[in-house]
Image (tube, rainbow, N blue to C red):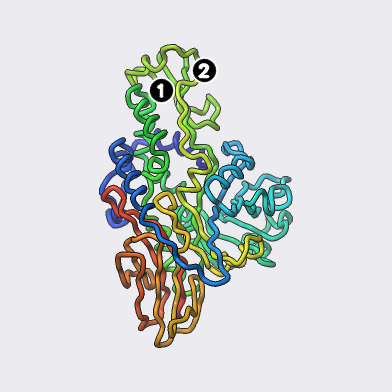
Amino acid sequence: MTPARVLLFLILITAPATWAEETRPGRKRSTLERMTPERLAAASADVAKLASQRRAVPPLPGLIDFKGIFHAHAEDSSHTGGTRAEMLADAQRAGVSFAFLANHYRPPLDFVTQTWRGLREGVLFVPGSETHGFLIHPTASVMDRMSAPKDELVRAVGANGGLLFLSHVEERRDHPLDGLTGMEIYNRHYDAMDDAESMRGIADMMTDPELLSRLEASLRLFPDAMLAAQLDYPALYLEKWDRETRTRRVVGIAANDCHHNQEFVLKAEGEGSVRLGAVVDKDSGMRLVTAEQRPKIGELLRGHKSGGIIARLNFDPYYRSMFNVATHVLAPELTEDAIRQAVANGRAYASHDWMGDPAGFLWTAREGGKTVAIMGDERQHHGGLTLLAELPLPAKIRVLRDGAEWKTGQGTRLEASVAEKGVYRVEAWLTVDGEERPWIYSNPIYLR
């Protein structure tokens, strides 16, 4: 299902989404509660307080923290609302250094040679496609392999430094990772797909004049907190990642899955009814809502002719998606080769930047006071090693070994001696409006 159909799908289904409680650590409120003006204001105030506490973390010699996005769509399908020029402008606004494009496969258009590639006004674009259940980023055209058996396509993409990631893990939980670089460990689309209650709530608010006015004001005043209200701990993704990394190196990236298509539109439709959908939907594909279903629709229709737009709420311009979640990569320079190599090496972490700028975060192994490994590295375990997490903001620091909690701490630094081999990764959590919310997910250090 395409992201553009999320709203229509969710508001038409009848069963509310349910979660096992253990998959929602830190949650105290529903998404709709988070979306109330009072809660949005409180969350935004806490984010401002956190920004005032930020400190600089000394960088590792020769490496720069580059903020980037994966799984980015522009001008590639009927359900994509954004353009590459818009993506470029919003990347500059959001401080994004690189974007891995994920054009939908549309032969005969070649998603490697017939799109943007290289630096444009300070932003590096890397071509690729969302196809066959993967994000694929070959270094050269693979159009002659797109209909080949999947294992042959995987080999062709991975040749000469190509990258492949398992995408939309909720749809393929048991998919093997043979030949792949890694997998998505968070996907913004899934946060919407598993939250039918809040999507129906937005539909209800858009068809009530008083609630619509409040929603418009909240989106204008607190846009980042509004988009992030659906954010949950991606337990399903992380469980697979932890399971797979026990036997192989698997690079974890965050998926923005941004199309700039979650711009919701309310249109007048004759007497006593409206149409509700996304900006990329044709009128015939939008949901028809009548005054019998929502009695206050008549008030919304006053002064509007049939086909006229009553309201347009833009939840996900590219720059907001880029603040919502990003993948930070530690590389020596902003070139395609350098970024590709750093990603392949797992020198990356995912972050929900809307809560705080994570640049400078480090996860390293030390011996004798010297750094001997960083996230993504694999080395033989022996005595005398310590693991060190350093953050630019005070946070709850959670270290996991083979997927199980190993050490926790509070602050900007956690250091612990290592007695056992294992796969060690870090999560950092920030308290926003009384809730602990996940902020950073590091790639592991593998001690075999």
The image's mark for residue 45 is none
Q: Is residue 246 visible?
A: yes
The vertical placement of 99 against 77, above or below, is: below
Given the image, on which type of amino acid does mark 2 rest?
A: Gly
The residue beneath circle 1 is 289
In the image, 1: left or right of 418?
Answer: right
N-term-proximal mark, 1 vs 2: 1
Q: Residue furthest bottom?
A: 383
The vertical placement of 293 against 43, above or below, is: above
Residue nearest the viewer, comparing 235 with 42: 42
Residue nearest the viewer, comparing 201 with 355: 355
> What element does badge 2 sit on?
loop
**Where does the image place residue 174, in percent across and percent down from the top left?**
46, 61
At 36% across and 51% down in the image, what residue appears?
232
At 41% across and 83% down in the image, what residue appears?
385
> What element does badge 1 sit on?
strand
**Residue 290, picture quadrant:** top left
Q: Are marks 1 and 2 in contact (CB under 8 Å)?
A: no
Distance of mark 1 from mark 2, alpha carbons? 14 Å
Residue nearest the viewer, comparing 358 with 296: 358
At 53% across and 25% down in the image, what residue appears?
284
